[in-house]
Image: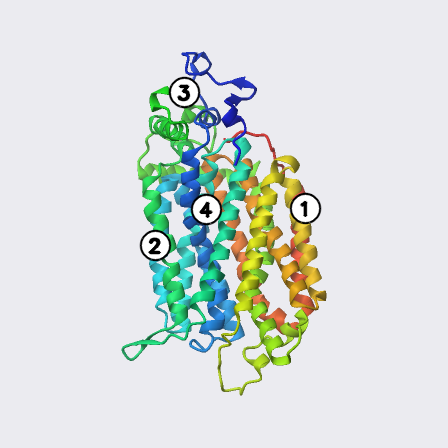
Amino acid sequence: MTVGDAETGEFNGKEFPQENGDKTEFEEPADFEKAIVAAKWGKFHLLVYAISITSGWSSIFETTTMSYVFPAAECDLDLKLEHKGLLNAITYTGMISTGFVWGYLCDTLGRKKLLVTGYLLDAIFVFLASSSQSFAMLMVAKFFGGFIINGPFSAITTYLSELHCTKQRGKAQFLLGIIYSAGTLVLPVLAIYILPLNIRINLGDIFVIHSWNIYLFICAFVPLTSAIAFLFLPESPKFLMTTGKNEKALKVFKKIYSMNTGQPEETFPIKSLQNEIELNSGNKYGKVTANRSKSKAFLEGWQQLKPLFHRPYRSKIILVCIIQCLTMNSLNTLRLWLPQIFQAMNDYELAHNSSAALCDAVAAFKPNETLELEPTECVVNTNNNSVYINSIIVCVATILAYVIATGLINKVGKKRLFVLMSVTSGVSAMALYFSRSTVVTLILASIFIGAGSVTINNMLAVIVEMFPTTLRTMTVALAMMSGRAGAVLGNTLYPLLLKAGCGPVFFYNGLLSLSCGLLVLLLPVDESASLT
């Protein structure tokens, strides 16, 4: 990744002072943007990206593992079509229930504490899910997993943004998107090697371990690793500045500078930072007390939320939440049901010894009907490597979409990129209705998932530009809460849409994506603004 002005040593056309003693440009206190650019880009950021891998995967694993568990656990848990829809939706329901709380805690108590605590708790609930012996037990574990993971998701998005300058902030969000996509790639790879295994380990009379239990158990180590890793990273310097802890913020900048350049911390060209408490003292809703206690942070946190319900932020937050709701409704229904669709096509081809038209496979979507088994018999088809391979191809295509978007974002702008990806996603979803083969279905599904995934991270980058630090994580949390409400609605409706026929399923996804491309045109986005 390039670092633009941060590497060339320039800021707003001015050259940074070199190590020759010329520090006159920084005699006055520096704002966040000047300080983060002076800290350069390098090894520290690469370390953060590396740690963000398991962090991003934790969110993806929490919402996506069920898509691969369904075929393997179908007989063990007696899963019906409606059960699968509920299991896909329940994690998002847990996320919705804490969207407001986690955002508030992150903006008042800090990013690092929430990241460590959140990932540790998530690991505990994934371990509980891996020990599930019934549908009800799995539902409870997935609900509380979603309840917890919403916090770290919002925090890592904000944390990563606040370690970059304006020019690199959008690219950082797409890099996070690539990390998420890599997580979706890991899941089917694990599934190929674990889920087809015929494992049945009896521990007592009621506790039985199957391959899918082991699959979930392995996934639990991802958030556990994240919790441990974030213990060794500093708090966001932007958050420290906003809460009046400039000395701590300056220490963080110096550490970043030293790690990136290899120079001693004492050579960092900036010696003092702006007092953001004083700068915001005239803000009716933005008062922050320096070095505040936790109780004071809570009280001021509630006060800082008021701007979301007043101009100029009220209309922005409403529009952002509507767009994210529709986007995630469209993407996270088809994305989570895609392995099941591939499984249905695979079963259809085995039963009929011919290539499956997508609508023919969807028409035979009820469990075991495609295998023409006895109604009372439940058999898992383990001859399904093609299902996992197709899922891997979709994941690789999504990573490629993020790579392309990373190169385009500064050239075409966030808003135009969002429109482009929304239209691409919508058209490909509706085109699935006309697919007559597995190959065409795979190509169109890859385009839909790739473009749709980019729009979600693109919107997060837009939010970072539109809202100030004291509202940023809260806004991300509320937007994602709205998006997850859309995902819950979509996954609850999807079994009904599947029973209604092939057309409603894919035109539903397509029209939602197209409507998002129109709504984003109403958002006021300043692509060149510095971080406030």
Q: Earlier in the sequence, mark 3 or mark 2?
A: 2
Label annotation for residue 121: 2
- Mark 1 lies on residue: 420
Asked whether 12 or 526 is in front, the reply is 12
Badge 3 marks a residue whose secondary structure is loop
Residue at the (68%, 51%) spot, across then down:
424
Q: Amino acid at mark 1?
A: Leu
- Mark 4 lies on residue: 154
Asked whether 413 or 327 is in front, the reply is 413
> Gap between marks 4 and 3, in whole Å?
30 Å
> Gap between marks 4 and 1, in whole Å?
25 Å
- Mark 3 lies on residue: 270
Give left or right: position of 218 versus 462: left
Q: Earlier in the sequence, mark 4 or mark 1?
A: 4
Mark 4 Cα-neighbour bin, 10 Å: few <14, some 14–19, many ≥20: many
Does residue 332 appear anywhere in the picture? no
